[in-house]
Amino acid sequence: MVAGIAFFAFAFVIMAAAPILMLKDVEVKEIATIAQTVIPEFTQLAEEYPEEFKQHFGKPTPKAFAEALSLGRDTYVAEACWHCHSQFVRPVSKEDLRFGRVSTIDEYMNKLQLPQMFGTRRVGPDLIRESGKRSNDWHMAHFYEPTNVVPVSVMPSYKWFFDDNKRPTKKALALTAYVQWLGSWWRPDLVNAYKLETTSGGGQ
Amino acid sequence: MAETHATSPKLVNHWLVKAHIVASLIFFFVGLVTGLLFSLQFVREYIGAGVELLSPGRVRMVHTNMLAYGFIANAFFGALYWIVPRLTGIPVFSEKLSKLLFWVWQLVLLLTFVGLMTGFAQGVEWGETPIFVDPLVVVGVVLMAINFYVPIIKTKEKALYVSLWYFSVAFVWTGLNYIMGNYLPQWFVPGAAGAAITGLFIHDLVGLFVTPLGWGMMYYFVPVILKKPIWSHALSLVGFWSLAFFYPLNGVHHYLWSPIPMYLQYGAVTSTVAVEIVVSTVIVNFFMTLKGNGDILRTSIPMRWFYVGMVFYFTTCVQCAFHVFLTVQEIIHFTDWVVGHAHLVMFGVFGFWILGMMTELWPKLVKREWYSTKLNEYHFWLTTIGMAVMFVDLMAAGLVQGYLWRSLAPWEDSIIFSIPFWMIRIVSGIMIFIGQILFVYNLWRTAKGPAVAYAPELQPSAA
């Protein structure tokens, strides 16, 4: 019994405690801090869907962005998006050519990766470099009925993110903001705003 | 507590064993139906598309959780209620507690089902049980441990049989693991470190919960049915201790090539290969035990389930030792190869062992002869062929997906070329489903059959 617990503890120490200790001096960014950099796509949402945006978020401020990111991430969890989409680019299989730069450990030191959304299956593509690749409208259309924008898609339709007039609800706006945020920290137009800590990145 | 009085309590409570088996089967069917339903999404034939409460994503989480915690856990608990009193000669700690735990566990499953379908999943793989349900699970595991530790500690047997070793540690490990996996990545440890913990959690569920209970069950049933001891007790203990040491170190292999530090990844790969060596010793032990009595596989359907399960266990672990290598991972990670692997393990091994246990115990529990042995044969063959087809099909699909991705073909190609494999997967699922329907029909007809005289229940040893 004692040995059994000891082995579990041993494994935990070297496998889990080790990375925790490695990162103990790296700040885990609060959502409010991240949201200080309001991505352009969020502001565009306010222009593209003025009535809905005003009703749910008011103006595209950092505070509104924080709320959107939070709700977006929670929706992403609740709808099991993370079971078909991953959120890390591997240094193999030419993924850097397909998605963008290889993921490093510091990118995930924030409260939106608590719990981590690395994912273990890709039916759909990886999303950690999704930011700015497609328009807000594309995402809205994609959520409503994926096959309208990707005819062979097997992603389910999320019609309940939209009301009876096919206008986006708060969830649709939030999820779009969240997905557009993924990888925004490495975009050339935004990279200085985020100031990522440099650590010895893993997986390279 | 075991007490001597005029009317000694029965050693084994049949109601508890039967209730857990029935509950297990109910959740098994929820799992099967959700699995079949989810597989339809992949060929765009989903029933109820666009309906929020039938959302395929949520259905997928219901599928995995109802099978792991409903089908597998319930069945194992039932088996424990049968086995532990027999091996220790002492009843479980408290019948009242046992019954309470039974209902509490089904409540946990019901809350999980409703919670997942209404959008309260927790973002932890294999830990999607809603956050508000987690504490109930932990309390349940602790109480269940007490229930079984009392007879294990109080037994007058000279040496603890290997099954009891496995059962004892399973509860400790599971309690610790569940807390670690559901709380640390949720509240305290983000990103890559959180992924390391999630990886440990996922693999510890397999290696420290399901595997010990499964092997413990095998170490009991096989010698009992064969009326022959295990070939080597020394080897069984080698297996136990090596498993205990190496299994927990595997966890990070669920996130290879992720930003988790590479030295941890290398450690996980090494440990995974080591565990395969351990597994081999256990398999050797069981096949050497069978040597000379191979004919029993023809006559005893439970033994067939057990040994096919062991063959699948060996297959899945060899496959794992192969695909854990970082080079192979480049192609197969994130693909259906892994899904095939997971199904072979969870269903082909543990599901099969459980079906074997149910086939063995049901006549004893309902005190009837089988309504039809033919139905049990059909059940076995439909399920085995279905599972084997699914496994090979998804391995092939995985290779197609992985190589297409690497070739930088448009993402859509990996979808288009997967569709034939996804169709075959549906067929294999239907085969498995029909097999289970035949089985449950047989169970029901057997229970309702004419009564037979049965041997009196074992009484507890004088305390």
Image (cartoon, coloured by chain):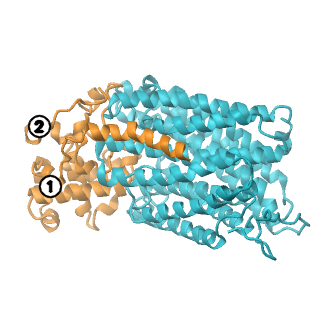
Chain colours: A orange, B cyan
**Residue, far right:** B453
Q: Do the residues labelled 2 and 1 touch (CB within 8 Å)?
A: no
Residue highlighted by disc 2:
A191
Residue B146 is left or right of residue A7, and the answer is right
Please give the residue where the numbered disc 1 appears in the rendered image. Answer: A32
Which of these two is toward me, B157 or A50?
A: B157
Please say whether residue A153 is visible from this viewpoint. no
Label whose residue precedes the other's in the sequence (2 or 1): 1
Q: In this view, does A167 lie above or below A126?
A: below
Q: Are there few (<14), some (14-19), or many (20+) residues within 10 Å of tag 1?
A: some
At label 2, counting other C-alpha atoms closer than 10 Å, the crowd grade (few under 14, some 14-19, many 20 or more) is few
Q: Do the residues at pointers 2 and 1 share their chain?
A: yes
Q: What residue is shown at x 33% (from left), y 60% (from top)?
A: A159
Q: Residue at x 38, y 63 (%)?
A: B120
Residue B139 in view here: yes
Return the x and y of residue B335 as percentages of the image width and height.
45, 36
Residue B150 image point, x, y percent? 63, 61
On the picture, is B28 further left or further right than B246? Answer: right
Q: Is mark 2 on a helix, strand or loop?
A: helix
Foreground residue among B79 and B398: B79
Name the chain letter of the residue that bears numbered label 2.
A
Question: Residue B245 in the image: x percent, y percent?
Answer: 52, 36
| Element type at mark 1 | helix
Residue type for callout 2: Val
> Residue drawn 25% across and 42% down?
A108
Q: In which quarter of the image is the C terminus of chain A?
A: top left
